[in-house]
Amino acid sequence: MTAFRDFNFKLLVVEQLMYGDETLTPAFSMAEHMRARGVEDLHDYVWEKGLEYTVLDEARAYFEQLEIPAELLATVEELTFDGGNQVFMECAPVWDGEDDLFDVRSLDDLELLPNLKRFIGGYALDHMLPGSLETLAARGIAVED
């Protein structure tokens, strides 16, 4: 079992594999998950429950338990940190990007991605985690904004 240390870093990997490459299937849909529980309007549910600024428990549980085989991790050549990432919308459907909810706190999980070549949104990453540009450069990972 591949264990990630940083949940938000794992979400970046999930973004690439599940919603980008579509190789990690099936794609998780919070709206479909909640419809199965009888919630027709996910956005209304979030607002009514006061869950605007949090990762929904159902999404956190799903992504924390999600197994990603090492063979699939080895296919990741690019990661993107962008406030519009689909995985962020699945976790926090009305998130506005104005807080640190999805900030990466550690790059310890880079070792899980032996073929990572490019990090898009790296300057935002460096704001979240000072020194990260140097860490990426030391591993030969190109950074784009």
Image (cartoon, grey):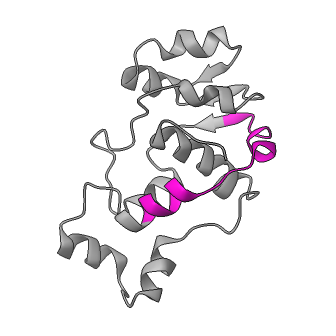
- The range drawn in magenta is 59-78
Q: Is residue 98 magenta?
A: no
Decide which of 125, 13 is in the foreground and name it: 13
Q: Quadrant of residue 74?
A: top right
Quadrant where the C terminus sits is top right
Residue that lies at the very extreme toward the bottom in this rendered image: 38
Q: State the image coordinates of residue 107 (x, y, percent, origin top left).
A: 52, 25
x 78%, y 29%: residue: 115
Residue 145, visible in the rendered structure: no
Residue that lies at the very extreme toward the front in this rendered image: 1
Left or right, 53 with reference to 79: left
Left or right, 74 with reference to 56: right
Residue 115, visible in the rendered structure: yes
Left or right, 88 with reference to 2: left
x 38%, y 26%: residue: 128
When the figure is inspected, residue 16 is found, relative to residue 123, above or below; the finding is below
Left or right, 110 with reference to 123: right
Q: State the image coordinates of residue 118 (x, y, percent, origin top left).
A: 68, 27
x 41%, y 68%: residue: 58
Q: Is residue 64 magenta?
A: yes
Q: State the image coordinates of residue 121 (x, y, percent, origin top left).
A: 52, 30
**Count of numbered marks:** 0
When the figure is inspected, residue 116 is found, relative to residue 43, above or below; the finding is above
x 68%, y 19%: residue: 141
Decide which of 113, 93 is in the foreground and name it: 113
When the figure is inspected, residue 51 is found, relative to residue 40, above or below; the finding is above
When the figure is inspected, residue 23 is found, relative to residue 71, above or below; the finding is below
Q: State the image coordinates of residue 44 (x, y, percent, origin top left).
A: 27, 78
